[in-house]
Amino acid sequence: MSELNHEDKLQRIIDIERELGEIQDVDVLLERILTETRKIVNADAGSIYVVEGDKLKIKYGQNDTHLKELAPGEKLPYTSFSFPINEKQICGYVAISGKPLNIKDCYKISESKPYKFNKNSDLTTDYRTKSMYTLPLKMANGNLLGVLQIINAKDADGNIIAFDENAEMLIAHFASSAVQALQHAYLTANMVKRMLKMSEFRDPKETYPHIERVSSYSLEIYDRWAFNHNIPEAEIHRYRDNLKIAAKFHDVGKVGISDVILKKAFPRFTDEERNIMKGHTCIGAQLFEPPESLLDVMSQEVALHHHDRWDGGASGYPGKISLSEFSVKDGIVPITEPLSGKDIPLSARIVAVADVFDALSHKRCYKEAWTIEDAFTEILNNSGTQFDPEVVMAFMQVKDRICSIQMAYPDEPED
């Protein structure tokens, strides 16, 4: 990470403030806030946490030193943990006090302080945390959104230094803009959750954990696919933001399917019921008609085409269909010419893999869960037939992160 001069840092803040305001997904925004804050003050590592009830939950952790040890295109392990908000933890202390905390050396914190630095992470990862700047992300009304922690500031020669007054000023200025962007993103997130709640009320399989897993898998698959195809960074940022939300709408069209069919075990469908069930793709797409944004376009693509097959096989649907050809009253998808290969939008090809993998590896009313390894094998076996081979390759390359996402979003226990 190269050192920027003061003027460049200020200009970077101005540029990124505009970009942050355009990001719609909360998780994508949180990751970007952490990345850009570290760039502004040339910090080696950092984490960002969100408030969940009386706990802080980590959303993203970054560490350039460890990242350099990995092969190009690989990411650090996906982390997911939470801890109670109290003064014993540095982040908890900042959350409670509502004030930033600048520590020059985490190994030399005075015994008189209520908080301590947990050295276990350093010992486990063979890292040395020294300078640390932790600040609360608070709304204008004082409500806490989360905590941002930046670790090991570096000078132009790469030496670890303390966060000086200039760094504090830059971080505070940037954090103010970040909070405004977060507030806007949370409004979008709440609207998305309300729409998806309708699907969950109608279809017990469309649970919050399933939706979050499919969305998170899709992002990981795209990131690796984009690396494999040398996609420009600016394009990656725009695409992944839309994909993270659009993937959540893959089965939203089930709100228009009768409960008699929706809650029936799949293998017992009649041919007519199966055709009506296929109509959820068209209903979902019609919810975004006419599309008024790039997010609408991608949400429509995902809803409509995530069941089309790469090889154009007969089991894929709905094919090359015009939404005007489908009527909710009739409910049946008309016979159409198959859609195949790269004619299927990339977003839909990615979500197809993510959705099937999650369905296989979790219990459904008509089947038991497959083992993780069996589910991976099934996806691999269908590469080039049901699924885009390049998407499957990207999926297999992020296998460890897929497994970590599974553990981060377990299914809710049955009543």
Image (cartoon, rainbow, N blue to C red):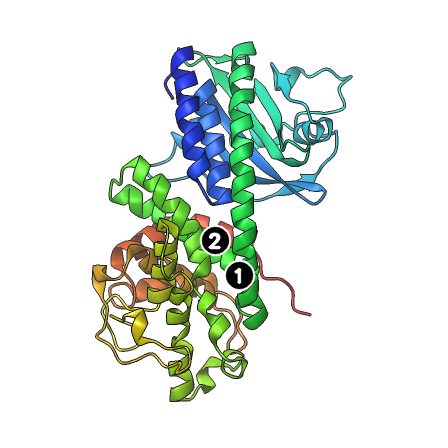
120 over 266 or under it: above or below: above
Q: Disc 2 vs disc 1: which is toward the camera?
A: 1
Amino acid at the residue labelled 1: Leu
Instruction: Pinpoint residue 208: horizontal percent, then vertical percent.
Output: 56, 59
Instruction: Pinpoint residue 175: horizontal percent, then vertical percent.
Output: 54, 26
| C-alpha separation, residue under disc 2 versus residue under disc 1 | 24 Å
**Pick the front one: 269 or 238:** 238
Q: In which quarter of the image is residue 113?
A: top right
Instruction: Pinpoint residue 195: horizontal percent, then vertical percent.
Output: 53, 60
Can residue 348 be seen?
A: yes
Left or right: 331 as drawn, with respect to 229: right
Instruction: Name the residue: 69% across, 17% down.
Output: 109
Q: Name the residue under label 2.
A: 403
Residue 196's tag is 1
Q: Earlier in the sequence, mark 2 or mark 1?
A: 1
Left or right: 134 as drawn, with respect to 111: left
Instruction: Pinpoint residue 242: horizontal percent, then vertical percent.
Output: 39, 48
Image quarter of the C terminus: bottom right
Instruction: Name the residue: 34% across, 69% down.
Output: 307
Asked if the residue under mark 1 is in contact with the one under mark 2, i.e. CB atoms within 8 Å, the reply is: no
Amino acid at the residue labelled 2: Cys
Mark 2: which secondary structure?
helix
